[in-house]
Structure formats: C-alpha cells, structure tokens
Image (spheres, grey):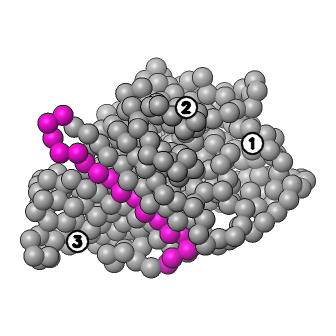
Amino acid sequence: MEMSDRRSFLQNAGAGAAAVALSGSSVAAGTADQLGVGIIGTGGMGSGHTRHLASRTDVQIRWLCDVDAKRLAANKEVVEKAGGKPDTTSDLRHVLDDKSVDAVFIATPDHWHAPAAILALDAGKHVYVEKPCCHNIREGRLMAKAVSRSGKHLQVGTQSRSTQVIIEGINRIKQGAVGDVLVAKAWNSQRRRSIGKSKPSTPPDYLDYDMWVGPAHMVPYRSNMLPSIWRWWYDFGTGDIGNDGVHDIDVACWGLGVDRHPNRLTCLGGKHFFDDDQQFPDTQYAVAEYDADGQPTKQLIFEQRIWSPYTQEGYENGVAFYGTNGVLLLGHTTGWRLYGPRNKLIEEQQGNIDLVGHHTNFFDCVRGRQSKPNADVNAGILSAGIVHLANIAARMNRVLEFDPEDEQIRNDPEANALVTRAYRSNHWAVPK
C-alpha cells in the first residue's frame, strides 16, 4: 500500500462512527461540554485529525498551526465548513499561550514530536502526539518526565491500542490461548516510491522553513524533503520503521508483555533497491532480546522491505506471536487468526483500525473518565526505542548491548552518541 493510500485509510477509519458528546467537571477551559483543542501540524495525519475533530460536538478546534500556509488555509476551510472559527499561526507558541486550549494534537514531522509535546505539557496542555513519540531515545525519557511533572495525559497515535479487534487478539494471548509467547515477529512489506535526487535550493514562499527545521540541526532546503519525504532523512525522520513499522512493533511489545527496553539488539539493513537520496534502509531485519531473571529470554523481530508489495502470513503489515502451544497472526488493518497444535485454525476475527475510538479514549482521560490513555507515554517510548536502536544498529553494523535502566549503549561510545542528537544552538524548543 502506498504511503498516501495508507494515510487515507487511517484518516478515514471509523469515519462513520458518531462522535459522542461528553461532559465532565475536569475541563480546564471552554464550556462545560466542550474541550478547546489546538492542532499542530495539518498535513497527512494532521488533516485527518482536523476532519474528525471538526465533526465532533464535544470539542472545539480553537487553533490550527502549520508552517505551510497552503495547508493551513485548506484545514481552516474544513473547520469553518463545520461551523468552527479557528485562529491560525505558524508558531506553536501562540497555541500554547492560549489558556482556552485544553489539549493539542501534534502531527508534525518526527523531529518536532518530543520538543512540541514537552513544551505543551509544561504549558499545562494534554497531548496527543503522533508516532513515533520521539526522534531519539533521550527525547523519550525527557517526554516521560514532562508527563510526570505536568500531571497531564499524553496519548501516542498508535491507534491499534484502541481498536477492539486488536484488543481481542491481545486478550487471547494474555489468556494463554497460544501458551507462553517467547517470540513476536512484526513486519512491514509494501512498495514505496523513490524520492529521487536533489540539490539544495530556495524554499517556496508559502513555507516557513526556519520554523519547520526548529530545534534540529539547520540544513539547506531540498525539494525532496517536503512534504512527507522528511521521514527518509536522519535529521528529521526515523525511516519507514518509525513511520509504519512502529505500529506493528507497538503491538508486538504489547502482546509479548515487555515493559522495558531490550538488553541487546542487532539489525542488518541497507539500501538494496532504491537509488535515491533517502538515508534509511529500504531493507531491514532487526532482532531484540529481553533477559528475565529465572525466565526464558524473549525475542522481538522486525523486518521490512519497502519495495516488496507482497503479504506475509496473509497480511501486508502484521505481527506473529509464537507461543509454546500455538500462534496468533495479526494484521495491522485486517484482523487476526489463531492456530493451535497441528496448525488447526481455532478462531479468527476481522476489523478495521479505529482512529475515532483512539481520539475518544484520549478525551475520556482529559475529562477524568479514564485514568490512563490506551497508548500512554511509556508504551510509546518502548516501541520508539526499538525503532531507534534498530536504526542505530543498522548504521553501526553491529550488536548493541543496551542498559534498559539508564538507557545507554554499553561499551560503544560511537553508537551511544546516537542515543541523543545535535540540536540547533540556543533554539527555544530544544528539549530540556
């Protein structure tokens, strides 16, 4: 499935579900039955959030923020057609300064996820942030600390956590339907497009490029960095493993029952197909291991080929949970099948991703109806951690020994330097 097709699917998932009006005394601003919302980033997933949220009666979109004036205008028109009157800006600080904003949706490029989320939390806003929740491992820990000190909720945009059919599949695993799960294998196989080759050029006049780069290291604008193509560049994205693969990695962590980073990880990967400017692997195979005192070591595998539009186990993107008494095969946007001994099909279910349900779970937490988001910051950090360690291992071409407690790569200063990143000197959004 092409990137644009997958994005359209996710944005339209659950579109027929009615938005239920909610009320509660925990609303910080706005009327008793509406939350004030700001949307930061109105491309791809951001425009999907705009459409869904504009149709809800329990929220009011007060701000739209984007560095691309054309996208900002298009999203403003969507909200206005639904009866809203949002303010617009290219500077997220205007959104965060508005006390009528209870929550923000952050759908920026990856390099802005953690900086924007931390700023929002410290400004007293609840946060819904797209996946991966951070651009590197250190940012994830800083984000978790911001959640703790702010007392606000943070939901990561891994919608599987609020999708009933996937919840049912994970419940089968937790109930022991396939015995003890020792290995989970996630995969991402689809055909992407070449991003071509380019040279530095002048940004278009409708783009605030300085704000787009933000706290990241300043590099010249290139025509094949925007829009959406930023995900293939080290400074701004995390590759397709952090784009699509993180959804399946998140489900793999969930079903495997891990609650911390792995002890070791290695990854072989490279550009075996595309001859273009993208810096991340188009072919990748990662293996992570989790040690446990007195218990068998658990293993998480991830593989991707973003030039190969063929299914595995019947699913384009998915996870296989290998147990001591069976296997459960789960497709990201399809459903699942459970097999017992001698490959006997025991049970299967079908269903679609529920983006609207993920929104509602977030708002329920903001209103005090739920104590914890389905995809909280800790879940987001664990799946993002696999992404970052796999990318580091592929770049270093070696096994990484990782300390899950202090989140450092042992005995490898070169690899450990990539646990964080270089930021633009003295930029106001550098995470602290």
Residue 8 in which image quadrant: bottom right
Does dot 1 land on a helix, a strand or a loop? helix
Name the outermost residue toward the top: 149
| Disc 1 residue type (three-letter) | Val
For mark 3, what is the residue?
A: 337
Q: Which residues are magenta?
A: 293-309
Does dot 3 land on a helix, a strand or a loop? strand
Q: Which disc number belongs to residue 213? A: 1
For mark 2, what is the residue?
A: 413
Cα–Cα span, label 3 and label 2: 44 Å
Cα–Cα span, label 1 and label 3: 44 Å
- Foreground residue among 1 and 29: 1
Judged by its main secondary structure, the magenta piece is strand
Q: Residue at x 57, y 42 (%)?
A: 135
Whether residue 14 is situated above or below residue 414 in the rendered picture? below
Q: Residue at x 36, y 49 (%)?
A: 288
| Disc 2 residue type (three-letter) | Pro
Give the quadrant of the C terminus.
top right
